[in-house]
Amino acid sequence: MARMTDHLGRPIVVVTGIGVVTSLGVGKTDNWAALTAGKSGIHPITRFPTDHLNTRISGTVDFLASSDRGASALTYELAETTAHEAIAEAGLDVANFGGPLFLASPPVELDWSERFSLYASGSEDIGPERLLAIARGLNSLDVFQTSQFGSIADRLSDSLGATGLPITLSTACASGATAIQLGVEAIRRGECDRALSIGADGSVTAEALIRFSLLSALSTQNDMPERASKPFSKDRDGFVIAEGAGALVLESLESAVGRGANVLGVLRGCGEKADDFHRTRSKPDGSPAIATVRAALQDAGMSEGEIEYVNAHGTSTPENDKMEHLSLSTVFGERIRDIPVSSNKSMIGHTLSAAGAVEAAFSLMTMREGVVPPTINYDNPDPAIDLDVVPNVKRSADISSVISNSFGFGGQNACLVLTREPV
């Protein structure tokens, strides 16, 4: 019989369901086919006017019904779509999941259509007084629900039959990985037999582009959108903002075996460390990222020599890619040159709050399918970043262990260690 606890006597946490939506399509089957074919989901923005914007490209999911209804509605649809796929694959009831929900989602603000509807209402007051007067006269909860950070998780929890108080979190670009970590920890503590962890983000708006542009964080290579995201390349000039979602059904190995579920992979370890150097920049010596990877390996009870693939954070920003290389070469030493290190963001862009969950899903599929997705647009290598980035073309490989990195704006870093088989 398989051992049911890890090296610290905690329940082994496995994955029994996966759901994915990105700019490449809906569902993990279509996403995986496009990802391993080296297809890009980046395209010109058509959802809103981009006149006078420095960046006019993104990885929006315009094929979903809620794509023109604002960030809150789209984030909800993304989360619900991936949740249904993951729960169905796990062989559970999509209306009665029976475990807690951990949702990573973007900070919420009123969509422009709602702002215009408020301003068009007849109050003659100005500023906050006007908005309060209008709000008091509303006969609908729609505006309230779309402007509350926890409302998406609340509604989703009700529709899925999740248990307890749903958790909504935002740790910037590490959010999706943090949602998975919280699910792992809840199972390890014995609070539940299963948990649903989701990262979802449908927040590509004009305001978002302007804010990231002011930080000089976005690529401005608008003429060829599919070539704009180029992690680890010498001519990288910023990330490409995108939308998407990833969902994992996490379960104790004992629970999964007991009900005959198919185990898709194992969450062996989680690590997190804060970086207090700057609001957006990483500490130049990479020490918080280094400590994050080492903490994840320690939590997993594994050594550096046991890792066979790195799903890189790989944003395509000049500084972040340099820092990630520094951290990996410090942790793995000379061996890092022989470990495949590829970035899904070269094809799907940076899905922000969803990124850690989406990339964990792809990491699991890498092990299950025996294929490492490429880093596309890698035509101008950076001599200062000596990594095997699996350039441009997928690679068949027998991968049984992965680390997935997520390094967030504001100083939150997270790393997940995933394996194909239980201990």
Image (cartoon, rainbow, N blue to C red):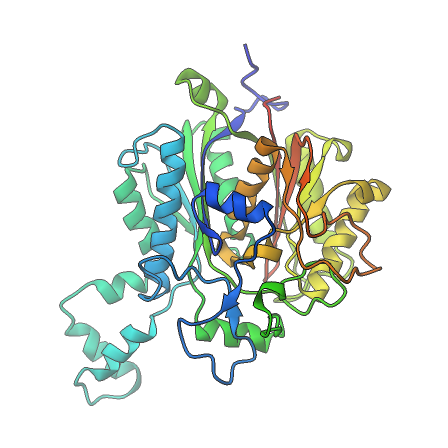
Q: Nearer the viewer, residue 275 or 376?
A: 376
Q: Is residue 385 above or below residue 333?
A: below
Direction from residue 119 to residue 363 in the image, left or right:
right
Question: Measuring 34% from the left and 71% from the top, which residue is drawn there?
Answer: 111
Quarter of the image for residue 197 reads top left
Q: Nearer the viewer, residue 400 or 112?
A: 400
Q: Residue 271: percent from the left, percent from the top?
A: 62, 42
Q: Nearer the viewer, residue 45 or 310?
A: 45
Q: Residue 2: percent from the left, percent from the top?
A: 56, 14
The residue at the far top in this view is: 1
Q: Quadrant of the C terminus?
A: top right
Q: Residue 225: percent from the left, percent from the top?
A: 57, 68
Q: Quadrant of the N terminus?
A: top right
Question: Measuring 35% from the left and 40% from the top, which residue is drawn there?
Answer: 84
Q: Is residue 218 above or below residue 194?
A: below
Question: Measuring 58% from the left and 78% from the top, which residue is drawn there?
Answer: 214
Q: Is residue 21 visible?
A: yes
